[in-house]
Amino acid sequence: MIEHRERLEKALGYRFSDGERLQLALTHRSVSRRHNNERLEFLGDAQLSQIISTELFHRFPDAAEGQLTRMRASLVRGQTLAEVARELGLGEYLILGGGELKSGGHRRESILADTLEALIGAMVIDGGEDACREVVLSWFEARLAAISPQSVRKDAKTRLQEWLQARKYELPVYGVLSVSGQAPKQSFEVECELSGLKKTFRASGPSRRRAEQQAAEQALEWLEQTHE
Amino acid sequence: MIEHRERLEKALGYRFSDGERLQLALTHRSVSRRHNNERLEFLGDAQLSQIISTELFHRFPDAAEGQLTRMRASLVRGQTLAEVARELGLGEYLILGGGELKSGGHRRESILADTLEALIGAMVIDGGEDACREVVLSWFEARLAAISPQSVRKDAKTRLQEWLQARKYELPVYGVLSVSGQAPKQSFEVECELSGLKKTFRASGPSRRRAEQQAAEQALEWLEQTHE
């Protein structure tokens, strides 16, 4: 059995009537191809999305569908789930096989996020949907209180495109100027050209996507200062 | 109010205590930017995924996560939802604005699928989660009875890649040979080259993806006849 089960259950805010479900939820695929938390993660992922969607729907009766979708995406994405898992102190309870014991960085983040979903799946089986919902909402309470339709803006490339379209300008053209370094520590330098406005912005970032968003952000700042 | 409401409710297998919810669920964005079914669709989408996921989880206690995920994807994808909507006769109840009244084909399919999700959202608000689940499962009953982990295979390109990897062959290389016709009625001819086996397969289809899948399917058939 897991060590310090009571301490973990106290942190989670949920006491399992069947401790094997808790144990399975913490068991990564690296321990066993057959006996691991992947099925629970499948269940928990859908359960989490339903809980958060329902909550957002009722909390924000005036939000448009697009705003609800972006708020949900921001709350259930891997990075947020890994943060919640850290707040619950989940890291020290993960049951990992040899190869994963020392994994760090990105890999570790995704294991934490997946395990959080698996715990949600285990809770819904163990205690039913209402109990599960109550616990999950308590985990997300601060984030739900902080989020608003205004806080989750569309990404910079989308906003730039909409700004230009609304004013009948040509759409921006992005290009990669250079790539330096070796994966996974590469740096991409890109440009964002607004040909209709005869203006080009450059930015760099750890991926092409991030660099492009950064360049679009700069373009938007310039447009907002000079055109509004 | 909607005409023939009782007939529709009979087809759905659910009687709304508040008919306005039913009406809103049927109202497409083309009628009103503010008063339409998009928020209900957001809610229904998550509800549907949770209902189907939970059902698959319990029906297939031995299925692996990947199989569950593929079964869910096949049941909740737009094409399936549009089919279910047609079986319920939803088409004649859609409340559409001018521009969409005569829309056909693909556009119509996606409106039907979205409306089905909106109806699920409306039901969960109107009657609660248990009542909603019961109705949704009745809509999907035949499909749930027919589906199995074996019936939802991985796509051909994935299976081909796995077959080759397992036998240490080089991975296939796909290339577009020609594109003919005008969108949306284009035809793509592609090839799939198995350099390790000195064999090339050609296929065509309405999109590059479909043509590649078709070529991979041919490659698999040949491999299964000649190598197993």
Image (cartoon, coloured by chain):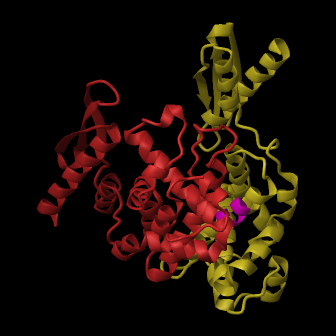
Chain colours: A yellow, B red
Q: Residue B140's x, y, as percent? A: 43, 69
Q: Residue B60's x, y, as percent? A: 44, 80
Determine the image quadrant of residue A55. bottom right
**Magenta residue check for A50:** yes
- The quarter of the rendered structure image containing the C terminus of chain B is bottom left
Determine the image quadrant of residue A202. top right
Q: Residue B141's x, y, as percent? A: 41, 74
Tell me if residue A99 can be seen. no
Q: Residue at the far left: name it.
A: B226
- Give the answer, above or below, for where B174 lies relative to A202: below
- Give the answer, above or below, for where A88 lies relative to B28: below
A44 with respect to B209 (left or right): right
- Give the answer, above or below, for where A25 lies relative to B93: below
**Magenta residue check for A210:** no
Question: Predominant secondary structure in magenta?
Answer: helix
B194 with respect to A117 (left or right): left
Q: Nearer the viewer, residue B117 or B147?
A: B117
Q: Residue at the far top: name it.
A: A198
Residue drawn at the location 35% of the way across and 65% of the way down: B152
Residue drawn at the location 78% of the way across and 52% of the way down: A61
The span shown in magenta is A49-54
Tell me if residue A135 can be seen. yes
B91 with respect to B39 (left or right): left
- Give the answer, above or below, for where B210 lies relative to B146: above
Residue drawn at the location 66% of the way across and 65% of the way down: A50
Q: Nearer the viewer, residue B117 or A136?
A: B117
Q: Residue A178's x, y, as percent? A: 60, 24
Q: Nearer the viewer, residue B218 or A92?
A: B218
Residue drawn at the location 49% of the way across and 62% of the way down: B8
How many numbered markers are drawn?
0
